[in-house]
Structures are given as C-alpha cells and as structure tokens.
Amino acid sequence: MLQLPDFTTLVEKQGVAVVNVSTTQVTAFGSAGIPGVPEDHPLYDFFRRLPTPPEEDEPSNSLGSGFIVSEDGHILTNAHVVDDADEVTVRLTDKREFKAKVVGSDRKTDIALLKIDAENLPTVRIGNPGTLKVGEWVIAIGSPFGFDSSVTAGIVSAIGRSLPDESLVPFIQTDVAINPGNSGGPLFNLKGEVVGINSQIYSRTGGYMGLSFAIPIDLAMKVSDELRAHGKVTRGRLGVQIQDLTPELASSFGLSAPSGALVAGVEKGSPAAKVGIQPGDVIVEFNGKTIKDSGELPPLVAGTQPGTSVGMGLLRKGQSKEVRIEIGELADERPAERSRDKSVPPNRLGLVLSELDEAEKRELSVATGLFVESAVGPAARAGIREGDVVVAVSDVEVSSLAEFNKLLAKQPKDKAIALLVRRGGRSLYVPVKPE
C-alpha cells in the first residue's frame, strides 16, 4: 500500500526560519480620499462610504514571505515583495518584529536580500535543485493572504521552465498551492532543504490554478552573494536576439533536428557582432554546455562574468562552426536618466509620454509602449508615476505618440480610460478618468 509522506518533522524543524515580510508604501490620495477610483468604477460607492482620509499622503501595505539564510539576520525574499517600499518589517515565528534594511534587489531574477538587526537566528538548510526530479514531493511554507506559517504540498511538475520576460530564470514548476503572500517563501524538498523561492503563479483568475513557479535556490544564492558584496548583480551579454527552433524552421535551415537557439538578430557593436555571428546561426554549445533549446542559453550567458572568453558552437547553413567570444556586460535593468523637454504640456490624462528606442525597450523588457516622463492630475491620482510604461489603451497596444493620441481622442470624455501599465516586470490595468 502506497503511503503518503509525513511532513510534520520537516515543518517543525524548518518552519521556524520562515518569516512574514510586510511593507509600507506612501501613496497619494485624491481630494475625495478615493485612491485612483473613478466615479463610474464598481467600487466607487464602497470607497465613498468609508471615512474620508486626510488630504495628505497615506500608507498602503502589502504582505509576502521570506526565510533566514544567516544567523546574523540576512533574509531572502522576492524583489517584487519589497520594490518601492518605504518601510519593510519582518516578523518571526516567535512574534518578534524587526525593521529590515533592503541590502539589494535584483528585478531580473526577482530576488531581494534583507537584513535585520538580530543574532543567533534559526536558518534554513540550502539544497541542490540540480538533483530535483519531476514527480518529487515538495512543500511551501509562507503567509498566503497574511495567514502566517501556512504549509502546502505538491510535486515538481517541470524543471528549467522558461517564462515570457523571465528568460534569466530556469523556473521549477510545481502544483503546490501558492497564493498572494506566499511570494518570497521557501520551497522545501523532503530532506528539509530549500530548493527554490516561490515567486509566481500562472492564473486567469488571480488565484491559484495548479501552476506555481519557484526560482532555483542555487541561482538565488548566487544573486544574494553579489547583492551582499556589491549591492547589484553583474551579468554577461552576447548581444543577440534568439528564438526557439521549431521543426519547420529546422527543416528550412537544412538541419536534421530542432535543437539549439536560433539567432534572430544581432546588435551592432555587440560581442556577437564582433566575432561574426549572423541571423540564422544556431547556437548549439556555450562554454562546453550543450544548448538544446533557446531557454537554456540566457541563464548561462548571464551567469558568465563579463570579460570572460568562452567557446561557442554554431550551425550555419547546416555546417558546424566554432567561435571564441569575449562576454560583454548586460546593462542594468533601470534605464539611464532621460532628458526631456519640460515645456511639453501633459495631455488630458495628466501624462507626458515619450517613445522608446530599441535599447530602452530591451532595458525595460517591453516589446512596445510609451515611457511616462511625468504624471500629474488624473494619472497621478490613479497611481501612475514617472518611469512606468504605458503598453496599451484598453486592449490596443501603442508604440507611438501618434497612435496613443489617436486612441485617446476616440475615448469618451466622461468615462475612465483603462491603461495597461508595465512597472518593474509586472503589468496592471489602471483606470484613469480625464478631467
């Protein structure tokens, strides 16, 4: 008779090193005290009946999870848990609370390192995600919806999963129940070792639907070490755009199998351009490691120290080719300061927008959209701020000011306009009511 695993000992020993992470961010309210909710919004009446808050800025709170990795108070969590927070509080299982310092945050891998002023803390055991097998039991401990120390269990569904806009992380996919508040919490194997950090879910409803994704702990620890030492993460760069090689594409390139990363574009002046890599080349080996699909290449390149010389194996028109390339440095995810014409007046939504060039799109991880130079009036009250990217008006994507202005002119002047906004790797619709 098959017997299910008993998680009780694991939870008793390792659960004490899992923490609750809460953040406070000051957000501006409108004059009526309704945070970015237009009068025609379904929740307007609900907010209107609440006591009117003061006119000054008010704090908003969010919850996440984390786990202690050093006895002197270093804690790992997700970057999106602490992004833009004005204050971070860590609560231990013994109910002690500490104000935490954000040592560093890396949006590309969604890892953040916190530090609290404490000693002799319980710590988790770090495992090796490379030994995980599909079908293996794993458990998560965290604070979904603020319910501290909640335990959920499931199995590993896939390993090395690539997700859109998350190409630097080979995710561990599980069916462990993960909900808001679990973000940043540990994923344990049956040995009681942390093998991943629960980061995100795939959902059409906003809640758990059986698809959860965790960042491998070896990658997280490497990022953590760099954040602790330098406050940021340095990554390698080739300067190519790649895509999956389908059977049809493989056949058209005269290849016997759809294996490798197909080069779709090469940036001018990049390390790849300097050694003659061309669109249509297929990268099949990087630094001695075989590349079976395109998702395997970005983490390998990113994990290579800039300035390192590595060998690469290519297929060009069906013929094998070896090149040696000096890895460049990937630009920081935050775009450089932009100089703008301060004489440009905001539109009727209170936005001053500018178009993005290709380099800025890569830095911001968007294929299209307009950069928010400034947000005042209705846009600011709705929560849009400088540095956001407006990707779409309702469900229509925009890539130029002309397109945006044309769409804006068609919108009713007495109703809220839904803008799809990209911020720090996340997208959300924001309703903005014109003045």
Image (spheres, rainbow, N blue to C red):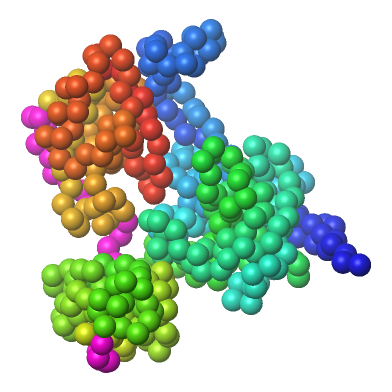
Left or right side of 84 for 149: right
Query: Which quadrant of the rendered structure holds the N terminus?
Result: bottom right
Left or right, 130 with reference to 348: right
Please state the horizontal and vertical placement of residue 10, each as a whole percent of the image: 80, 62
**Is residue 361 rendered to the left or right of residue 72?**
left
- Magenta part mainly helix, strand or loop? loop
Tell me the residue at 50%/29% (across/down): 60
- Of residue 62 and residue 85, the one placed in the foreground of this image is 62
Residue depicted at 44% across the width and 30% down the height: 26
Residue 181, image x and y in percent? 61, 42
Q: What range of the chain is rendered magenta? A: 318-344
| Towards the viewer: 66 or 116 | 66
Counting from the top left corner in percent of width and height, residue 104 is at 45, 56
Q: Position of residue 268 (x, y in %)?
A: 13, 70
Q: Is residue 251 magenta?
A: no
Q: Is residue 52 visible?
A: no
Splitting the image into 4 quarters, where does residue 270 fall? bottom left
Q: Residue furthest right?
A: 1
Q: Quadrant of the C terminus?
A: top left
Q: Is residue 25 above or below residue 221?
A: above
Q: Is residue 59 above or below residue 425?
A: above
Work out whether residue 255 can be spotted.
Answer: yes
Q: Quadrant location of residue 108? A: bottom left
Residue at 44 percent of width and 58 percent of height: 163
Q: How many marks?
A: 0
Which residue lies at the image location 38% right of the left edge and 81% below the top edge?
Answer: 257
Q: Is residue 321 above or below residue 3?
A: below
Q: Name the foreground residue: 27 vs 358.
A: 358
Q: Is residue 378 left or right of residue 179?
A: left
Residue 334 lies in magenta, yes or no? yes
